[in-house]
Each structure stands twice: as structure tokens, then as C-alpha cells.
Amino acid sequence: MSEPSSLGESAPSGESAPLGESAPRDHFDVAIVGAGPGGMTAAIYSSRARLDTVVLERNTAGGIMQVTERVENYPGFPEGITGFELAEKMKQQAAQFGAELREITGVLALELQPNGDWRIVTDEGAVTARVVILSPGVEARKLGVPGEAEFMGRGVSYCATCDGPLYRGKEVVVIGGGNAAVEEGMFLARFAAAVHVVHRRDELRATRIAQERAFAQPNMRFIWNGQVRRIVGETKVEAVDYEDLLDHSQHTLPVSGVFFYVGQLPNTGFLRGVVELDAGGYIVTDAHLRTSQPGMFACGDARAGLIKQIANAVGEGALAAIEAEKYLVARDFEARQASAGAPGAGASGAQAKFVTPGAAPADDAATGG
Ligand code: NAP
């Protein structure tokens, strides 16, 4: 194995390395797609296990966690920590064991090679890896109302942490009733004169502790049974039109900003036709986090799991890396057996445990759903 460069220090694989520096590597033991908490934990574990590891990420490390204003339920930080800071710490920890973070624009293709390795084609060139861990994360769901796309960046936002300070002394609307809507709404309440939460029911989905805090916040107001129908403005957001879903009356609320928190969608478009996805587009795995493809594991929010929490993604990242390592050991053992001409070699090895897309995993129930 060659000595890996540190996170963030390597040239993208598509660029030639500066004179005097070694050329970017194009083969790894482990390639991790996505640098959220799941992907970064997998990188920490696999690089610490002395596996040559690359993390391919199209944004900055941290995934959706990175734009979470305050994380209070991740163990070890009793006073809370910003999502950005936690992402930075995970990145440093992976770097210290030698993992390389490579920024890409996107994954274009994932191809299984005849020798069992994967070839990952990105906008910045291709790498091969003996095993792939998918951790592409999720992105904010769009509501799809008129004005949402038009006023993006001119009053419409999906990130309170990024844009909240722009609304100092102004009135904003938050759409949604989950943890993200309530917690990010609380963050906005630090700057805005008023935060109006428009929720389609008369009860929040957010946890009790988040609700209690939000209800105690003097400049946070709740519009129950409301559905935003339109964003209104000339060149920037000036108001939202919403409907009272009980009596169907129409209302206009003058605001300068609209923050959408109506759920998340998995970043798995590039995996369609490659690996088994469930009806919602989440990656189906067995209990060992093996996907329907050999040498391909998945972890984090884009996996078809029951809860979407940083602590959970971290646990899955650790498991995916440990399972990936076991898979490589089994694969090497099989290869040695085969080259030694052992009878039956290859018939019961690592690859035989995997299933083809659409079929149920052989020895574990799929955990998708
Ligand atoms: P979420 O929990 O799925 O909540 C989405 C909210 O948007 C719900 O209140 C939902 O209403 C509403 N909604 C969905 N579609 C809508 C539509 N078409 N029109 C109007 N409203 C709509 O999503 P999230 O808040 O982004 O959280 C995603 C995941 O991350 C969750 O598992 C959450 O627990 C987790 N998370 C955890 C924390 C934490 O633990 N501190 C913080 C943030 C996020 P209904 O309630 O009526 O369905």
C-alpha cells in the first residue's frame, strides 16, 4: 500500500500533480462515497485498520449535519456542538489515520470489474477500489410551490445556519413541523423579529424537548393546519400565500424569508440500476450493511434504516467499515486458495454471500423500510 496523503491536501484525480509531488493515486482498498457522519466514521475505521482509503465528496465534509446549527444529542458533547465543528473534527480524525478526502462534482458510474474491484467514474476522473462504502446522505425535499425555485437565494432557503443572519430584524416563515423545522426555526429566532412556523397539522412531529423550547420562544409563532401555496414578490420574497386547511380560507403573510423543512430525499439518483433501492430511493442492505452488489456496503441517512440520527449514522459507518474489512480478508483468502488450487475454492467465499439486485439477501433479512 502506498502512503496516503492527508485529507484535503491531494489534487483531484483529474488534475495533474504539481512538479515534485507524486501523482494522484487511482487505486484504493476502500472508496467511500459521501463524507457525512457515516462516511467519515467508515473512513476513520478503515484507515485506522491500515486500509488505503479515499472519501469522495461533492460538497464539504459533513453532509446535512454540516448545516445543522447545534447538535445536542451526540454523545460526548454535553454542552452541544455545531454541526460544522463536529464535521471538522471527524474530518481531522480520518485524516490523522491517513484517509484521503477527494472533492468531486458527482459520481457518474460505478462499474464492477472482472477482478471484483469497483471502478468509480467521477467528473474528475476515475478511481478503482477493492470495496465501496456508499454513504451519499440526503438532501432537503422541495415543496414544489410556485415561487420556490424562482426566489431561491432571494428569500427562499433550505439552510437556516447559512442564511439566518441575513434576516436580522425581519420576519420569516418556516414550513414544516419536524425536528429540522423546529430546531432551525429556533436558530432563526435569534435574528428574526418573528418566525412563523406553518405546519399542515395541529401537532408537531418534532421531539417533545424541541417543542417545549419552541413554544417558550416569544418571537416564534405557529400557524396550524396551514399549507403554503405560493411565494410572492417582485424581485425577492415579499410574502407567502397560505391556505387554512380546515376552512380553506386563503391568507397572505408578509415575510422576507421562507425556510423549507418538509423532509429529506436520499442522494441516490446515481445508484439507480446499480444497486437495489427501496420505493423511496433508499439503499437496501442486510444487517451486515451489505448491499445487493458484491463488495459494496451502505451506511447513513441514505440507507433504508429506521431512524435518521448522527449517532446512528456513526454506528453504521463503523459497522460498514468492519464488514468491508472482513470481506477483503475473505476475498484475499479465497484468492490464495484458488491460486493454490484448493478444491472448492471460490464456491463459498465472500462473493457467494451476496445477492443480485432485487433478490433477498441470502442469510439476513433486508432491513429496508
Ligand atoms: P421529517 O421529520 O420528515 O419532518 C418533515 C415535516 O415536513 C413534517 O412535519 C411533515 O408534516 C412536513 N411535510 C412533509 N411534506 C409536506 C408537504 N408536502 N407539505 C407540508 N408539510 C410537509 O423531516 P426533518 O425534520 O427534515 O427530519 C429528517 C430526519 O432527521 C428525521 O428523522 C428527524 O428526526 C431527523 N432530525 C433529527 C434531529 C435531532 O434529533 N435533533 C434534528 C433534525 C433532524 P407531517 O408531520 O404532517 O408529516
Image (cartoon, rainbow, N blue to C red):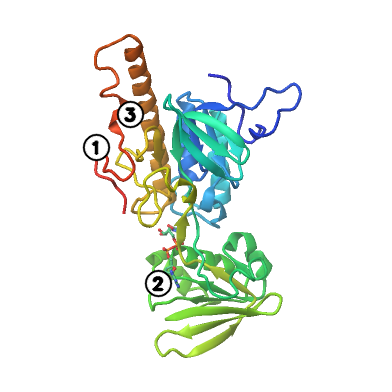
Q: Quadrant of residue 112?
A: top left
Q: Secondary structure at mark 2?
A: loop
Q: Are marks 3 and 2 in contact (CB under 8 Å)?
A: no
Determine which residue is flagged by label 3.
351
Q: Which mark is residue 204?
A: 2
- Left or right: where does residue 340 sit relative to residue 210? left
Q: Secondary structure at mark 3?
A: helix
Residue type pointed to by label 3: Gln
Mark 3 to mark 2 CA distance (whole Å): 46 Å
Q: Earlier in the sequence, mark 1 or mark 3?
A: 3
Q: Secondary structure at mark 1?
A: loop
Residue type pointed to by label 1: Ala
Q: Residues within 10 Å of mark 1 (few under 14, many from 20)?
A: few
Residue type pointed to by label 2: Leu
Front position among marks 3 and 2: 3
Along the line of sight, which residue is nearer the eye, 330 or 306? Answer: 330
Quadrant containing ligand 1 reads bottom left
Residue 81 showing in the rendered view: no
Q: Residues within 10 Å of mark 3 (few under 14, many from 20)?
A: some
**How many numbered marks appear?**
3
Some atom of ligand 1 lies within 8 Å of the CB belonging to the residue at label 1: no
Mark 1 to mark 3 CA distance (whole Å): 11 Å
